[in-house]
Image (cartoon, grey):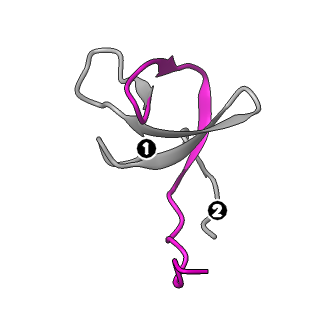
Amino acid sequence: MKEWISVKDQMPTMGQDILCFSKGRIFHSWWDSISSMCDWYDIQNTWIIEDVTHWMPLPLPPKDLNG
């Protein structure tokens, strides 16, 4: 598993599916660096995630998806 990356050290690629950490919760999200606000969005684009402190790339899927 990858390590968490501080937003102070590095930001993800715009539009990349990631996990982000905010206020004690983990979200499947993406980051928009084009908007004037540079916002974090949940993967369904239903809300903006505030106060993100860390992020990481999504883990690889299981090798055997049949159990």
Q: Which residue is mark 2?
A: 3
The image quadrant of residue 54 is top right
What residue is shown at x 57% (from left), y 41% (from top)? 20
Q: Characterize the local packing of mark 1: few (<14), some (14-19) or many (20 or more) Cα atoms within 10 angstroms.
A: some
The relative height of residue 46 versus residue 28 in the rendered view (above or below) is: above
What residue is shown at x 40% (from left), y 47% (from top)? 12
Where is residue 62 drawn, in percent x and y? 55, 76
| In this picture, residue 58 sits left or right of residue 27 | left
Q: In terms of depth relative to the viewer, which is nearer, 53 or 21?
A: 21
The relative height of residue 42 versus residue 55 in the rendered view (above or below) is: above
**Amino acid carrying mark 2 in the image:** Glu
In terms of secondary structure, what is the magenta stretch mainly? loop
Where is residue 10 drawn, in percent x and y? 47, 47
Q: In the current view of this chain or complex, which residue is farthest to the right? A: 24
Q: In the current view of this chain or complex, which residue is farthest to the bottom? A: 64
| In this picture, residue 61 sits left or right of residue 38 | right
Q: Which residue is mark 1?
A: 11
**Amino acid carrying mark 1 in the image:** Met
- Circle count: 2
Where is residue 26 drawn, in percent x and y? 65, 39
Q: Which residues are magenta?
A: 42-67
Check if residue 33 falls in the magenta segment. Answer: no
| In this picture, residue 20 sits left or right of residue 42 | right
